[in-house]
Each structure stands twice: as structure tokens, then as C-alpha cells.
Image (tube, rainbow, N blue to C red):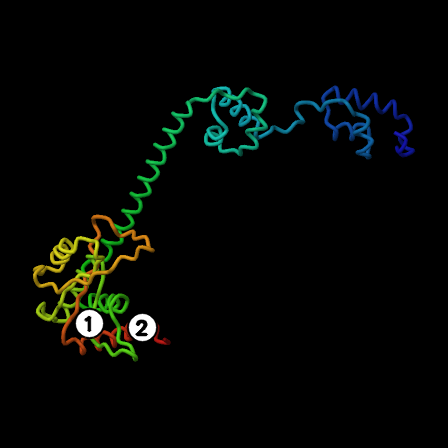
Amino acid sequence: MSRATGKYTDLEGLREQATALRRAGLSLRQIRDRLHIDNNELLNRLVKGEPPPEWTKRPNAKDDLRARARELRQQGMTYDQIQMELGCSKSSISLWVRDLPKPAPRYTSEEQRALMNAGLVRMRAARDERREEAKRAAREGVGRLTDRELFIAGVTLYWAEGAKDKPYRRRECLHFINSDPHVIRLYLRWLALLGVPRERMRFRVSIHESADVAGAEGFWAEVAGVDASAFRKATLKRHNPKTTRKNTAEAYRGCLVIYVTESADLYRRMEGAWYGIVLGADPAA
């Protein structure tokens, strides 16, 4: 009290009055106004040790959450379950319930593992369902292609996958190889659009020597809609023992090679159309 200013001479009297008013339920503001004390530090010292009246306390918005968290903990809930129920942070939950005993595990380790695996199965199934739904919606959004759209699609496909003419190796002909049956079907549909008869197409399988060559030829003959006897001799790839092949499953059919005879003009049209697509997409190219 030594720092009090000179106008507060009877400090003990002020203390008694301030204490009495505090116990009577007055707030600090009311005591200050009643005793004409304009020094807040002095006022706080005069009522030190006296708890504020209940009516001056602000309600804590988290009191209800705290009580509910303790109730849920006593019911055996984990922090994660309480967080999901109340939407508050784990750090707050820990402060509120850490004095309570930890609930006994609801499941054995085997049961927990089974529940986790079942949850993973559901999660993967839901993910697969979303994946397939996205593909289905995109597929149905395309609709039937016009001849122009099919032509552009075929040109783009060939430029990505077909053999190209090089300045050091003049090869102006349509020569296509792929292992995807859908790609092969689209390519054949494009050739039909260009008016190429099947008589000008030459088919050959390219496959590893250890695979079922006859089975692959039968498979690709069905895809192409031709007789397997029309296939040229297969190109066999020798196995390199230093490499590990992954395409050894029963579904491995190698690649189908499709060569079109007398196709120099078609190749030039294809290449010109490709650069037309490039310019059409970006005139500044």
C-alpha cells in the first residue's frame, strides 16, 4: 500500500468498506463509484482475497461441452468418439476428462483388426463405386461419334501409336501395332471410314516366344473379325533372362500388327490431317 497516493489516507478504513461492499455482492465498478476510488490497482488490492459475486461472472460457453464430454467418457467413449459427437478438439477433451479413468477396451485386438479390415473393405468398395460411376458418366457423355469426330479420333490415335515416316527412313504407309482390343477395334473402324477394304489389310501377331501363339491368333482374329488362317507368320520376341516380365498372365495375347497395302496416299492424308488438328487447336503453333 506504500505506493498509494496521498488522498487515500485511511487505507484500513477503505479496506474495511471495500471488503464489506464486496461481500454484499457489489461489483468492482460499483465499489469504485461508491467509495470514489479512481485507482484500479488500489481497488484490486483493497478487495484482494474476496471472490467476486456470482452475478458478475460471465458464463463459460464450454461448460456444457465439458460436462457432456465427461459424461461420454464415463460411458466408455474414446477421445475420437467424443470428438465426433461434440465437434471439439482432442486437446480440449483431454483437459476436461484426463482425471477420469481410461475406459476398458471395447474389443479384443483380433476384433479390432477384423473391424479395421471390414472398414477397409467398405472404403475400397465405395472408392471403386465412385471410380466406376465417374467412368460411366464420362462414357455416356460422349454419345455416338459423327464421321468427322471418328476421323479426327483415328488420326490422333494413329499419330500416337502408328509407325511414322522419317527423313532417314521413308515409310509412307499405314502400319499400326497395339495390345488393346478396344484400340484395335477403333482403328479398324477408322480404316473402314477411309474406305480401306479388308483385302488390303495384313494381320500379324507380335508376341513372346513362350506364350500361346495359336491362342493369341485366335483371340485377335475374333477382335478383327477375320479368319485366323489369314494371319501372316507371327513375330516372336525372344525372352531375355536378365529381365523380369510381368505380362505372363493367361490373358496375355501379345500385340496385333495391322499393315495396309498401297497406303502411301492415305498416310499423307493422315499426316496432313494431324497437323491440321494441331493448327486447329492452336493457330499460333
Q: Amino acid at mark 1?
A: Leu
Judging from the image, what secondary structure is the residue with disc 1 in? loop
* Crowd rating for badge 2 (residues with CA inside 10 Å; few <14, some 14–19, many 20+): some
Disc number placed over residue 174 in the picture, else none: 1
How many numbered marks appear?
2
Most foreground residue, 201 or 35? 201
Q: Quadrant of the C terminus?
A: bottom left
Judging from the image, what secondary structure is the residue with disc 2 in? helix
Q: Which of the two labelled residues, at mark 2 and mark 1, occupies the earlier sequence position?
A: 1
Whole-percent x, y for residue 24 in the image = 74, 19
Q: Which residue is mark 2?
A: 278
At 18% from the left and 78% from the top, the residue drawn is: 264
| 135 lies left or right of 20 | left
Whole-percent x, y for residue 276 in the image = 28, 75
Q: Amino acid at mark 2?
A: Val
Q: Is residue 270 above or below residue 31?
A: below
